[in-house]
Image (spheres, rainbow, N blue to C red):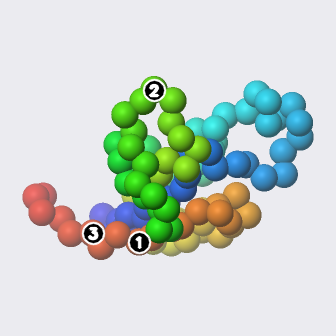
C-alpha cells in the first residue's frame, strides 16, 4: 500500500477564479466546486470540502457561519488525501489556480488498521 499524505487547502468563501471570461464568471462553479472537479479529473484518492462553522484566516476578524448567506471572507477548507508524489504533481499542475490559497501538509498517523 502506498503511503498517503493529507494536505489542507484554506481559502475564503468568496475566492475568485482568475482568468475566466465574463460568461464563465457569471455561470461557472464556485472555487471549491471547481477545485473538487479538478481533483476528481486528476484521479486523486480522496477530496473533502469541510464545513467551517466559524474561524478566521490571516488574522482577520472571526467569521461566524450562523446565517444562510456566508460572508465572502468566511474560511473554507478542502482536504486531499493521496500519495505525496500524486499530490505534488496535482499542486504543480494547479499552481496558478491555487495562487491565492494556503496549502498545508497534515501529519498522517494511522490509528486503526
Q: Earlier in the sequence, mark 1 or mark 2?
A: 2
* Residue 15 % position (x, y): 64, 49
Q: Which residue appears at 73% of the width and 33% of the height? A: 28
Q: Nearer the viewer, mark 1 or mark 2?
A: 2
Q: Nearer the viewer, mark 2 or mark 3?
A: 2
Q: Which residue appears at 39% of the width and 39% of the height? A: 65
> How far separated are the C-alphas under marks 2 and 3?
33 Å
Q: Nearer the viewer, residue 12 or 113?
A: 12
Instruction: Kindly tell me whether residue 82 is visible in this rendering.
Output: no
Mark count = 3
Q: Disc 3 marks which residue? A: 108
Instruction: Kindly tell me whether residue 72 is visible in this rendering.
Output: yes
Quadrant placement of the N terminus? bottom left
Q: Earlier in the sequence, mark 2 or mark 3?
A: 2
Q: Of the numbered discs in the image, which one, if any, rests on residue 68?
A: 2
Q: Nearer the viewer, residue 102 or 96?
A: 102
Amino acid at each position: 500500500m502506498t503511503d498517503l499524505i493529507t494536505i489542507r487547502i484554506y481559502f475564503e468563501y468568496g475566492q475568485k477564479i482568475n482568468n475566466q471570461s465574463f460568461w464563465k464568471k457569471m455561470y461557472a462553479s464556485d472555487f471549491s466546486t471547481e477545485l473538487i472537479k479538478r481533483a476528481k479529473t486528476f484521479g486523486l484518492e480522496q477530496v473533502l470540502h469541510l464545513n467551517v462553522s466559524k474561524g478566521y484566516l490571516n488574522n482577520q476578524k472571526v467569521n461566524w457561519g450562523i446565517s444562510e448567506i456566508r460572508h465572502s471572507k468566511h474560511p473554507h477548507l478542502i482536504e486531499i488525501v493521496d500519495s505525496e508524489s500524486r499530490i505534488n504533481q496535482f499542486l504543480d499542475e494547479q499552481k496558478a489556480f491555487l495562487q491565492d490559497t494556503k496549502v498545508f501538509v497534515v501529519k498522517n498517523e494511522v490509528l486503526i488498521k
